[in-house]
Image (cartoon, rainbow, N blue to C red):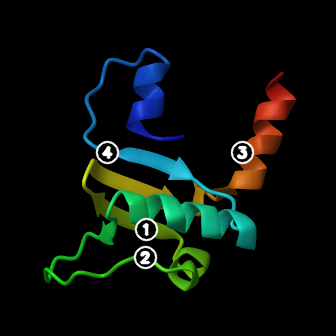
Amino acid sequence: MVGGVAAIIEGVPITTLDLDIVYERSPKNLQRLLEVLQTVDACYRDPAGRHIVPTIEKLATIRTNLLQTKLGPFDVLASIGGDSFEDLLDLGRAQK
């Protein structure tokens, strides 16, 4: 988890309306992520009002997936600040 919710958990006094995550892009994890997105009726936030649902192909290629779900906005990121999921894992391990 990254972004505003992660900052709030760390004690930063901010307000946010969405949840941001950085995800691993392995085929197995993409399938798991897609299944979760389907359970919350995820679709892309589209200014034209089209109903575009995530697919494995989109999750594998689009680096920033700005989604709306029945639970609220959900930003699904392949990387943040140039760092992938694996990079962030390595950073976390190095800090321990």
If you read the primary sequence from the N terminus, does the residue marked by circle 1 or circle 3 appear first? Answer: 1
Question: Residue 64: in sight, yes or no?
Answer: yes
- Residue to which mark 4 is pinned: 18
Disc on res. 38: none
Nearer to us: label 1 or label 3: 1
The one of 32 and 78 positioned closer to us in this rendering: 32
Q: Secondary structure at mark 4?
A: loop
Nearer to us: label 4 or label 2: 2
- Residue to which mark 2 is pinned: 54
**Residues at marks 2 and 1 touching, judged by CB atoms closer than 8 Å:** yes
Q: Please, what is the three-letter code of the amino acid marked with disc 1? A: Asn
Q: Mark 4: give few (<14), some (14-19) or many (20+) Cα within 10 Å.
A: some
If you read the primary sequence from the N terminus, does the residue marked by circle 4 or circle 2 appear first? Answer: 4
As drawn, 62 above or below 65: below
Seen in the image, is 18 located left or right of residue 93?
left
Q: Please, what is the three-letter code of the amino acid marked with disc 4? A: Asp
Task: Kindly indicate the quadrant of the structure image that contains residue 79.
Answer: bottom right
Disc on res. 65: 1
Q: Mark 1: give few (<14), some (14-19) or many (20+) Cα within 10 Å.
A: some
Q: Please, what is the three-letter code of the amino acid marked with disc 3? A: Leu
Q: Secondary structure at mark 1?
A: strand
- Residue to which mark 3 is pinned: 88
If you read the primary sequence from the N terminus, does the residue marked by circle 2 or circle 1 appear first? Answer: 2
